[in-house]
Amino acid sequence: MLAYASAVSKLRTPALVAAGLTILPDESAHAAAIRAVFGTLDPTIHAVPDAQLSKETRSQWILPV
Protein backbone atom coordinates (compact mmCIF):
# COMPACT_ATOMS: atom_id res chain seq x y z
CA MET A 1 0.00 0.00 0.00
CA LEU A 2 2.87 2.33 0.77
CA ALA A 3 4.14 1.87 -2.78
CA TYR A 4 0.76 2.86 -4.26
CA ALA A 5 0.47 5.96 -2.08
CA SER A 6 3.96 7.02 -3.07
CA ALA A 7 3.30 6.46 -6.77
CA VAL A 8 -0.07 8.25 -6.71
CA SER A 9 1.49 11.28 -5.04
CA LYS A 10 3.73 11.70 -8.10
CA LEU A 11 0.87 11.77 -10.60
CA ARG A 12 -0.09 15.17 -12.00
CA THR A 13 -3.23 14.48 -14.02
CA PRO A 14 -6.40 14.63 -11.87
CA ALA A 15 -7.94 11.67 -13.69
CA LEU A 16 -4.86 9.54 -13.05
CA VAL A 17 -4.73 10.58 -9.38
CA ALA A 18 -8.40 9.62 -9.00
CA ALA A 19 -7.80 6.27 -10.69
CA GLY A 20 -4.77 5.61 -8.53
CA LEU A 21 -6.64 6.44 -5.34
CA THR A 22 -9.27 3.81 -6.13
CA ILE A 23 -6.59 1.14 -5.56
CA LEU A 24 -5.82 2.14 -1.96
CA PRO A 25 -9.00 0.70 -0.34
CA ASP A 26 -8.37 -2.63 -2.05
CA GLU A 27 -4.80 -2.69 -0.79
CA SER A 28 -6.03 -1.99 2.75
CA ALA A 29 -8.49 -4.87 2.43
CA HIS A 30 -5.73 -7.17 1.18
CA ALA A 31 -3.49 -6.23 4.09
CA ALA A 32 -6.32 -6.89 6.56
CA ALA A 33 -7.02 -10.28 4.96
CA ILE A 34 -3.35 -11.24 5.13
CA ARG A 35 -3.24 -10.23 8.82
CA ALA A 36 -6.33 -12.35 9.51
CA VAL A 37 -4.87 -15.42 7.78
CA PHE A 38 -1.55 -15.14 9.60
CA GLY A 39 -3.45 -14.68 12.85
CA THR A 40 -5.31 -17.96 12.34
CA LEU A 41 -2.07 -19.79 11.57
CA ASP A 42 -0.20 -18.51 14.60
CA PRO A 43 -1.41 -15.61 16.78
CA THR A 44 2.19 -14.64 17.55
CA ILE A 45 2.94 -13.89 13.87
CA HIS A 46 2.56 -10.21 13.10
CA ALA A 47 3.50 -10.20 9.42
CA VAL A 48 1.32 -7.20 8.60
CA PRO A 49 0.74 -5.35 11.89
CA ASP A 50 -0.93 -2.31 10.36
CA ALA A 51 -2.95 -1.95 7.16
CA GLN A 52 -1.85 1.69 6.91
CA LEU A 53 1.89 1.33 6.42
CA SER A 54 4.04 4.42 6.65
CA LYS A 55 7.59 5.52 7.38
CA GLU A 56 6.58 6.00 11.01
CA THR A 57 5.44 2.36 11.36
CA ARG A 58 8.17 0.81 9.20
CA SER A 59 9.89 -0.89 12.15
CA GLN A 60 6.61 -2.66 12.95
CA TRP A 61 6.12 -4.21 9.52
CA ILE A 62 9.60 -5.49 8.74
CA LEU A 63 9.81 -9.12 9.86
CA PRO A 64 12.82 -10.09 11.96
CA VAL A 65 14.75 -13.11 10.69
Image (cartoon, helix red, strand yellow):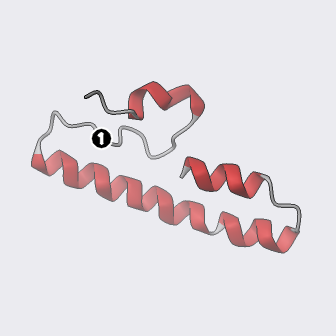
Dot 1 corresponds to which residue? 47
Q: Find residue 54 and report its horizontal and vertical position in percent.
A: 57, 36
Q: Find residue 18 and report its horizontal and vertical position in percent.
A: 75, 69
Q: Find residue 36 and report its horizontal and vertical position in percent.
A: 25, 52
The residue sitting at 70% across, 55% down in the picture is: 7
Image: 10 above or below 46: below
Image: 38 above or below 45: below
Quadrant of the frame with the C terminus: top left
Other-residue count near label 1 (Cα within 10 Å), few / some / many at <14 / 14–19 / ≥20: some
In terms of image quadrants, where is residue 15?
Answer: bottom right
Q: Nearer the viewer, residue 62 or 18?
A: 62
The residue sitting at 20% across, 37% down in the picture is: 45
Image: 54 above or below 59: below
Type of amino acid at the residue the image marks with label 1:
Ala
Secondary structure at numbered mark 1: loop
Is residue 50 toward the left or the right of residue 55 in the image? left
The residue sitting at 51% across, 40% down in the picture is: 53
Image: 22 above or below 45: below
Q: Find residue 4 and report its horizontal and vertical position in percent.
A: 61, 56
Label count reads: 1
Question: Outermost residue, front direction?
Answer: 65
